[in-house]
Image (spheres, rainbow, N blue to C red):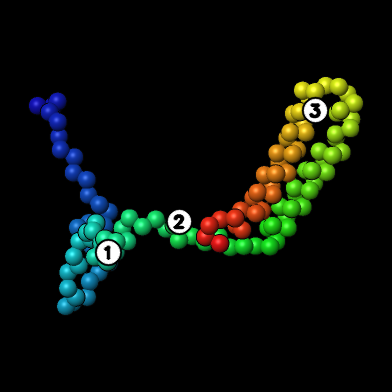
């Protein structure tokens, strides 16, 4: 019949051969397995590597964060008087709060390696 499904046979371009030729006398390779033979002991399976991580203390990072913090504190000081004299307290709180928050965040980020319990 004309409408019967036909089997389509797909052949690989390399044919039935292995991709790499084997030498005579070379043993057949075993198929790859998903289990590892060199798995760690049971006591190390649940060990989180972050528990042993020690962050390096870079003085240059601390200096950079202190400078960044002082810049934002300086901006807060510079904008204080004009914002206070304008009488718009909503803008005053928003701008000063932003500068002071970023200055404190920069200090905390710079001091983080020195405050961590692994130091």
Residue 92, percent across and down?
80, 27
Question: Are there few (<14), some (14-19), or many (20+) residues within 10 Å of tag 1?
Answer: few
Q: Residue tagged by mark 3?
A: 92
Q: Which residue is mark 2?
A: 50
Q: Earlier in the sequence, mark 2 or mark 3?
A: 2
At x 86% / y 28%, what residue is drawn?
Answer: 84
- The residue wearing badge 1 is 41
Residue 17: give x, y in percent of width and height.
21, 61
Q: Residue at x 45, y 61 (%)?
A: 52
Question: How far apart, in angstroms, are the residues tagged by discs 2 and 3?
Answer: 42 Å
Assign a secondary structure to mark 3: helix
Q: Residues within 10 Å of mark 3 (few under 14, many from 20)?
A: many
Q: Is residue 100 left or right of residue 77?
A: left
State which quarter of the image contains the N terminus.
top left
Foreground of the two, 16 or 31: 31
Single out the mark in the foreground, 1 or 3: 3
Give the Cα separation between the discs numbered 2 and 1: 19 Å
**Residue 112 visible in the current orientation:** yes
Which circle's residue, 1 or 3, is located before the other in the chain?
Answer: 1
Q: CA distance from mark 1 to mark 3?
A: 60 Å
Q: Residue at x 27, y 64 (%)?
A: 41
Task: Say above or below: 21 vs 76.
Answer: below
The answer, for residue 19, to whether it is visible in the render is no
């Amino acid at each position: 019949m004309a409408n019967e499904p036909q089997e389509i046979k797909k052949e690989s371009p390399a044919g039935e051969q292995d991709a790499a030729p084997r030498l005579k006398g070379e043993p057949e390779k075993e198929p790859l397995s998903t289990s590892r033979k060199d798995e760690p002991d049971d006591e190390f399976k649940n060990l989180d590597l972050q528990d042993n991580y020690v962050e390096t203390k870079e003085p240059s990072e601390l200096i950079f964060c202190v400078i960044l913090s002082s810049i934002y504190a300086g901006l807060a000081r510079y904008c204080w008087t004009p914002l206070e004299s304008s009488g718009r307290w909503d803008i005053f709180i928003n701008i000063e709060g932003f500068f002071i928050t970023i200055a404190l965040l920069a200090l905390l980020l710079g001091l983080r390696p020195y405050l961590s319990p692994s130091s």
